[in-house]
Amino acid sequence: MKVLGMRSTILFLALLAANPLWATFDVEIDIAIDNQTAGAASGFIVEFVATATDEIPSTIAVEFDKGALDLAGIVAGDVIGTMEFPITSALVTGSIEGDFEVTATTATSVEGDVAITSIDPILVTLLGVDVGDALLTFTFTDYGTDTGTTLEISDSAGLPATSPLPVDATITIDLDPIYVHTPAAGDLTVTATITSGLFSEVTASETFEIAAGTEPQFLRGDASANGLVNALIDALFLLNYQFSAGPAPPCFASADVDGDGAVNALLDALYILAYQFSSGPAPPAPGPTVCGPDPNALECLAPGPC
């Protein structure tokens, strides 16, 4: 029998360490949301607990099968959540913390980096990253018409696919309330998936019962309360009300297009026209596409078909 020489043995062991045939990816997932009220904004927490795992996470996805995003007022530089990542092995104990920092937004999505805010020195040495670096990138996408949203997170620091020693680790993602529940009561299913650098995958789903809200639901910008935001129709309705003794808006909350807590026909008409025809900002929460309550509590006697 041919016996491997010392150099060959070391090389063989190194290759096994880099691509272990015995690698495991044992992860439990816990999902929690801040509230379960229809039409209300909700933060959420997703926790991934890995036990004696050899594989390093590479991507994470959190999917909501209903609801929408409220991105009004969110700009580059804003922080919309946090991440904690404590790690323990036989030789290393340390922790990384980071902020979900926005770099860009569109009408239907927000993207950015998970920027490191705190990291233990041993992990700086092992991973080659430090405070201020982007450990991960993220995109949070709204699919429109209350069809759900997805948060996607991926490694941007070039983390290794495996660990030479089994690791206990917990990744906790805590997002601010930019997700808005569907306006209708019913079940909401949230599915979280974590994938390792070797493409092992663990998925878990949690179903939450969303209760009907107590506040009137409406579409921001639907001044005529016909169930549809149409800039020309709603702008003319507002101007007719203020300058031609036309009928009052059935729901003043809907007519408060810019969300400043008051109805000013000229300003609100210009706001909705700029939104639809000049790429202006969308009307703030609950927005022009998903029904929801009015945070300014304006009168809403007839909120339309919401």
Image (cartoon, rainbow, N blue to C red):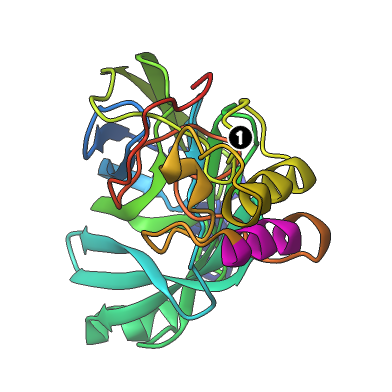
| Furthest residue toward right | 277
Dividing the image into 4 quarters, which one contains the N terminus? top right
Identified by mark 1, the residue type is Ser
Residue drawn at 35 percent across, 44 percent down: 294
Report the span colored magenta: 266-275
Instruction: Count up the numbered dots.
Output: 1
Residue 26 spot, x, y in % from top left: 33, 34
In depth, the one of 71 and 79 nearer the eye is 71
**211 lies above or below 288:** above
- Answer with the quarter of the image where residue 95 lies: bottom left
Task: Name the residue tied to disc 1.
Answer: 224
Say few, some or many: other residues with alpha carbon within 10 Å of mark 1 (under 14 / 14 to 19 / 20 or more).
many
User: Is 167 on the left or on the right of 267, as rendered?
Assistant: left
Residue 32 visible in this rendered orientation of the protein: yes
Say which of 9 and 252 sits in front. Answer: 252
| Furthest residue toward top | 186
Residue shown at 34% from the left, 29% from the top = 216
Q: Is residue 231 left or right of residue 206?
A: right
At 42% from the left and 44% from the top, the residue drawn is 253
